[in-house]
Amino acid sequence: MNTLNLAAVERLLRTEAIGRRITYLDSTGSTMDIAREWAAADAPHGAVVIAEEQTAGRGRFGRRWVSPAGLNLYLTLLVRPDAERLGALAMITSLAVCRAIETATDLAPVIKWPNDVQIGGRKVSGILIESESQGEDVRYALVGPGINVNDPIADPEIAEIATSLAREVGREVSREDVLAAFLNEFEDAYVTPLQVHAAWRSRLATLGEAVRLGFRGETYEGVAEDVTPDGSLILRLPDGSRRTFEAGEVSLRG
Protein backbone atom coordinates (compact mmCIF):
# COMPACT_ATOMS: atom_id res chain seq x y z
CA MET A 1 0.00 0.00 0.00
CA ASN A 2 1.24 3.48 -0.87
CA THR A 3 1.62 5.55 2.27
CA LEU A 4 1.27 9.29 2.57
CA ASN A 5 4.50 11.26 3.01
CA LEU A 6 3.60 13.69 5.78
CA ALA A 7 7.03 15.31 5.72
CA ALA A 8 6.43 16.29 2.10
CA VAL A 9 3.02 17.70 3.04
CA GLU A 10 4.53 19.74 5.86
CA ARG A 11 7.14 21.25 3.53
CA LEU A 12 4.35 22.48 1.24
CA LEU A 13 2.18 23.98 3.98
CA ARG A 14 2.02 27.75 4.41
CA THR A 15 -0.78 27.75 7.01
CA GLU A 16 -0.73 29.04 10.55
CA ALA A 17 -3.24 26.61 12.10
CA ILE A 18 -4.86 24.37 9.50
CA GLY A 19 -3.04 21.05 9.23
CA ARG A 20 -0.40 21.87 11.84
CA ARG A 21 -1.45 18.86 13.92
CA ILE A 22 -2.11 15.67 11.99
CA THR A 23 -3.00 12.18 13.16
CA TYR A 24 -2.32 9.60 10.48
CA LEU A 25 -4.00 6.17 10.58
CA ASP A 26 -3.56 3.10 8.38
CA SER A 27 -7.23 2.22 8.76
CA THR A 28 -10.25 3.41 10.71
CA GLY A 29 -14.00 3.17 10.56
CA SER A 30 -14.45 6.88 9.85
CA THR A 31 -12.14 9.85 10.31
CA MET A 32 -15.25 11.81 11.37
CA ASP A 33 -15.66 9.63 14.45
CA ILE A 34 -12.00 9.99 15.46
CA ALA A 35 -12.13 13.76 14.98
CA ARG A 36 -15.25 13.98 17.12
CA GLU A 37 -13.39 12.24 19.96
CA TRP A 38 -10.55 14.72 19.47
CA ALA A 39 -12.92 17.66 19.63
CA ALA A 40 -14.39 16.43 22.91
CA ALA A 41 -10.84 16.22 24.26
CA ASP A 42 -10.19 19.88 23.36
CA ALA A 43 -7.99 19.28 20.32
CA PRO A 44 -6.91 22.56 18.69
CA HIS A 45 -8.52 24.38 15.82
CA GLY A 46 -7.01 23.13 12.57
CA ALA A 47 -6.23 19.58 13.70
CA VAL A 48 -6.61 16.91 11.01
CA VAL A 49 -7.29 13.17 11.06
CA ILE A 50 -6.21 11.30 7.92
CA ALA A 51 -6.67 7.61 7.16
CA GLU A 52 -5.36 5.48 4.32
CA GLU A 53 -8.56 3.44 4.47
CA GLN A 54 -12.04 3.84 5.95
CA THR A 55 -14.07 0.75 6.64
CA ALA A 56 -17.24 2.72 7.39
CA GLY A 57 -16.79 5.93 5.43
CA ARG A 58 -19.95 7.93 4.92
CA GLY A 59 -21.13 10.88 2.91
CA ARG A 60 -24.15 13.15 3.06
CA PHE A 61 -27.51 11.57 3.88
CA GLY A 62 -25.71 8.60 5.44
CA ARG A 63 -24.57 7.22 2.09
CA ARG A 64 -21.59 4.87 1.99
CA TRP A 65 -18.35 6.49 0.83
CA VAL A 66 -16.20 3.92 -0.98
CA SER A 67 -12.75 4.21 0.64
CA PRO A 68 -10.11 1.84 -0.83
CA ALA A 69 -6.68 1.89 0.81
CA GLY A 70 -3.70 3.92 -0.38
CA LEU A 71 -5.34 5.67 -3.33
CA ASN A 72 -7.34 8.69 -2.23
CA LEU A 73 -7.61 11.28 0.53
CA TYR A 74 -9.92 10.66 3.48
CA LEU A 75 -9.65 13.31 6.15
CA THR A 76 -11.58 15.26 8.72
CA LEU A 77 -10.57 18.75 9.73
CA LEU A 78 -11.53 20.10 13.15
CA VAL A 79 -12.36 23.80 13.23
CA ARG A 80 -13.82 26.03 15.92
CA PRO A 81 -15.78 28.61 13.91
CA ASP A 82 -17.99 31.51 14.86
CA ALA A 83 -21.57 31.45 13.55
CA GLU A 84 -20.64 33.34 10.36
CA ARG A 85 -17.95 30.88 9.40
CA LEU A 86 -20.06 27.87 10.34
CA GLY A 87 -22.67 28.96 7.81
CA ALA A 88 -20.02 29.38 5.14
CA LEU A 89 -18.18 26.08 5.68
CA ALA A 90 -19.78 24.25 2.74
CA MET A 91 -18.76 27.08 0.42
CA ILE A 92 -15.29 27.40 1.96
CA THR A 93 -14.57 23.69 1.71
CA SER A 94 -15.82 23.01 -1.81
CA LEU A 95 -14.04 26.10 -3.09
CA ALA A 96 -10.81 24.96 -1.40
CA VAL A 97 -11.13 21.51 -2.98
CA CYS A 98 -11.60 23.06 -6.44
CA ARG A 99 -8.60 25.33 -6.04
CA ALA A 100 -6.44 22.49 -4.70
CA ILE A 101 -7.29 20.30 -7.69
CA GLU A 102 -6.42 23.15 -10.06
CA THR A 103 -3.10 23.69 -8.29
CA ALA A 104 -2.14 20.02 -8.42
CA THR A 105 -3.44 19.09 -11.89
CA ASP A 106 -4.60 22.08 -13.99
CA LEU A 107 -8.04 20.44 -14.23
CA ALA A 108 -11.09 22.73 -14.02
CA PRO A 109 -13.55 21.27 -11.49
CA VAL A 110 -17.01 22.68 -10.88
CA ILE A 111 -19.43 22.47 -7.97
CA LYS A 112 -22.80 20.77 -7.94
CA TRP A 113 -24.85 22.59 -5.32
CA PRO A 114 -24.32 22.58 -2.45
CA ASN A 115 -20.80 21.13 -2.23
CA ASP A 116 -20.11 18.14 -4.50
CA VAL A 117 -17.06 18.72 -6.68
CA GLN A 118 -17.30 17.37 -10.21
CA ILE A 119 -15.17 16.97 -13.31
CA GLY A 120 -16.93 16.23 -16.59
CA GLY A 121 -20.20 15.65 -14.78
CA ARG A 122 -18.73 12.98 -12.50
CA LYS A 123 -18.11 13.36 -8.78
CA VAL A 124 -14.49 13.62 -7.70
CA SER A 125 -15.07 14.88 -4.16
CA GLY A 126 -17.84 14.79 -1.61
CA ILE A 127 -17.93 16.78 1.61
CA LEU A 128 -19.58 15.93 4.93
CA ILE A 129 -19.87 18.66 7.58
CA GLU A 130 -21.10 18.08 11.11
CA SER A 131 -21.12 20.50 14.03
CA GLU A 132 -21.79 20.69 17.74
CA SER A 133 -23.32 23.72 19.43
CA GLN A 134 -24.16 24.68 22.99
CA GLY A 135 -26.91 27.24 23.05
CA GLU A 136 -25.90 29.93 20.56
CA ASP A 137 -22.21 29.05 20.80
CA VAL A 138 -20.58 26.77 18.23
CA ARG A 139 -18.33 24.31 20.05
CA TYR A 140 -16.73 22.86 16.94
CA ALA A 141 -17.31 21.74 13.36
CA LEU A 142 -15.96 18.69 11.57
CA VAL A 143 -15.15 19.13 7.88
CA GLY A 144 -14.75 15.85 6.04
CA PRO A 145 -13.80 16.00 2.37
CA GLY A 146 -13.13 12.79 0.49
CA ILE A 147 -11.12 13.33 -2.68
CA ASN A 148 -10.64 10.62 -5.32
CA VAL A 149 -7.01 11.02 -6.32
CA ASN A 150 -5.58 7.80 -7.81
CA ASP A 151 -8.63 5.56 -7.62
CA PRO A 152 -9.26 3.64 -10.87
CA ILE A 153 -13.01 3.77 -10.03
CA ALA A 154 -13.44 0.05 -10.63
CA ASP A 155 -16.38 -0.36 -8.24
CA PRO A 156 -19.42 -0.91 -10.51
CA GLU A 157 -21.61 0.86 -7.96
CA ILE A 158 -19.95 4.21 -8.71
CA ALA A 159 -18.21 3.75 -12.08
CA GLU A 160 -20.77 5.79 -14.03
CA ILE A 161 -21.11 8.66 -11.56
CA ALA A 162 -17.61 9.09 -10.09
CA THR A 163 -14.14 9.89 -11.33
CA SER A 164 -10.66 10.52 -9.97
CA LEU A 165 -7.86 12.95 -10.71
CA ALA A 166 -5.67 10.19 -12.13
CA ARG A 167 -8.48 9.02 -14.37
CA GLU A 168 -8.91 12.53 -15.74
CA VAL A 169 -5.24 13.35 -16.35
CA GLY A 170 -4.09 9.86 -17.35
CA ARG A 171 -1.33 9.56 -14.76
CA GLU A 172 -0.77 9.15 -11.05
CA VAL A 173 -1.27 12.36 -9.05
CA SER A 174 0.63 13.28 -5.91
CA ARG A 175 -1.68 12.96 -2.93
CA GLU A 176 0.76 15.08 -0.95
CA ASP A 177 0.39 17.94 -3.42
CA VAL A 178 -3.41 17.75 -3.32
CA LEU A 179 -3.58 17.53 0.47
CA ALA A 180 -1.19 20.43 1.10
CA ALA A 181 -2.95 22.57 -1.50
CA PHE A 182 -6.33 21.84 0.09
CA LEU A 183 -5.14 22.77 3.59
CA ASN A 184 -3.55 25.98 2.28
CA GLU A 185 -6.63 26.96 0.28
CA PHE A 186 -8.97 26.11 3.14
CA GLU A 187 -7.16 28.43 5.54
CA ASP A 188 -7.06 31.24 2.97
CA ALA A 189 -10.83 31.00 2.46
CA TYR A 190 -11.59 30.46 6.16
CA VAL A 191 -9.91 33.68 7.27
CA THR A 192 -11.70 35.72 4.56
CA PRO A 193 -15.27 34.28 4.56
CA LEU A 194 -16.84 37.42 3.08
CA GLN A 195 -14.82 36.91 -0.10
CA VAL A 196 -15.87 33.30 -0.61
CA HIS A 197 -19.42 33.58 -1.91
CA ALA A 198 -18.71 35.15 -5.31
CA ALA A 199 -15.87 32.73 -6.08
CA TRP A 200 -17.98 29.74 -5.00
CA ARG A 201 -21.01 30.93 -6.98
CA SER A 202 -18.93 31.34 -10.13
CA ARG A 203 -18.14 27.60 -10.05
CA LEU A 204 -21.70 26.35 -9.57
CA ALA A 205 -22.62 24.12 -12.50
CA THR A 206 -26.18 23.85 -11.14
CA LEU A 207 -27.24 27.44 -11.86
CA GLY A 208 -29.52 27.83 -14.87
CA GLU A 209 -30.28 24.09 -14.99
CA ALA A 210 -33.66 22.41 -14.75
CA VAL A 211 -33.33 20.33 -11.59
CA ARG A 212 -35.15 18.01 -9.23
CA LEU A 213 -34.53 18.78 -5.56
CA GLY A 214 -35.22 16.56 -2.59
CA PHE A 215 -35.77 18.37 0.70
CA ARG A 216 -37.19 16.98 3.94
CA GLY A 217 -38.96 14.13 2.22
CA GLU A 218 -40.50 16.28 -0.50
CA THR A 219 -39.48 16.62 -4.15
CA TYR A 220 -39.49 19.92 -6.02
CA GLU A 221 -38.81 20.62 -9.70
CA GLY A 222 -37.79 23.90 -11.25
CA VAL A 223 -34.87 25.95 -12.49
CA ALA A 224 -31.92 26.63 -10.22
CA GLU A 225 -31.99 30.38 -10.57
CA ASP A 226 -29.45 31.70 -8.05
CA VAL A 227 -27.97 31.32 -4.58
CA THR A 228 -28.27 33.57 -1.54
CA PRO A 229 -25.25 34.99 0.34
CA ASP A 230 -25.44 32.10 2.81
CA GLY A 231 -25.33 29.53 -0.01
CA SER A 232 -29.03 28.58 -0.12
CA LEU A 233 -30.47 27.68 -3.52
CA ILE A 234 -33.20 29.80 -5.11
CA LEU A 235 -35.44 27.55 -7.18
CA ARG A 236 -37.92 28.99 -9.69
CA LEU A 237 -40.93 26.68 -9.66
CA PRO A 238 -43.12 25.91 -12.72
CA ASP A 239 -45.76 28.44 -11.60
CA GLY A 240 -43.14 31.21 -11.65
CA SER A 241 -42.80 31.49 -7.88
CA ARG A 242 -39.46 31.19 -6.15
CA ARG A 243 -38.52 29.14 -3.13
CA THR A 244 -35.26 29.10 -1.20
CA PHE A 245 -33.66 25.89 0.12
CA GLU A 246 -30.78 25.88 2.58
CA ALA A 247 -29.98 22.22 1.88
CA GLY A 248 -31.10 19.31 -0.22
CA GLU A 249 -30.16 16.75 -2.85
CA VAL A 250 -30.14 18.03 -6.42
CA SER A 251 -30.24 16.08 -9.66
CA LEU A 252 -30.58 17.30 -13.21
CA ARG A 253 -34.07 16.89 -14.62
CA GLY A 254 -33.95 14.67 -17.68
Image: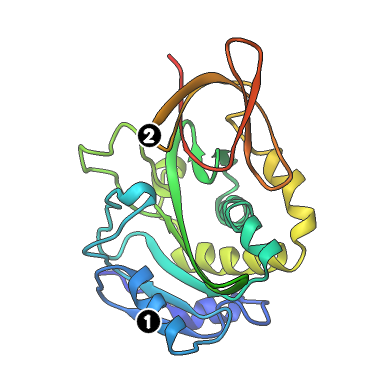
Residue 164's x, y, as percent?
40, 46
**Three-letter code for the amino acid on which mark 2 is drawn:** Gly
Q: Is residue 104 left or right of residue 50?
A: right
Quick check: marks 1 and 2 in contact, CB under 8 Å? no
Q: What residue do we see at 59% from left, 50% from top?
A: 98
Q: Indicate whether 59 appears above or below 13.
A: above
Q: What residue do we see at 44% from left, 69% from top?
A: 76
Residue 216's x, y, as percent?
42, 38
Nearest to the eye among marks 1 and 2: give it.
2
Q: Nearer the viewer, residue 108 or 25?
A: 25
In the rendered image, the quadrant that contains the C terminus is top left
Q: Indicate whether 132 appears above or below 107.
A: below
Q: What residue do we see at 60% from left, 47% from top?
A: 106
Give the numbered dot on residue 37.
1
Residue 231's x, y, as percent?
65, 44
Give the numbered dot on residue 114.
none
**Three-letter code for the amino acid on which mark 1 is drawn:** Glu
Dot 2 corresponds to which residue? 217
Q: Nearer the viewer, residue 104 or 228?
A: 228
Q: What residue do we see at 25% from left, 73% from top?
A: 28
Q: Secondary structure at mark 1?
A: helix
Q: Nearer the viewer, residue 96 or 70?
A: 96
Give how far apart the Cα atoms at labels 1 and 2 are: 31 Å
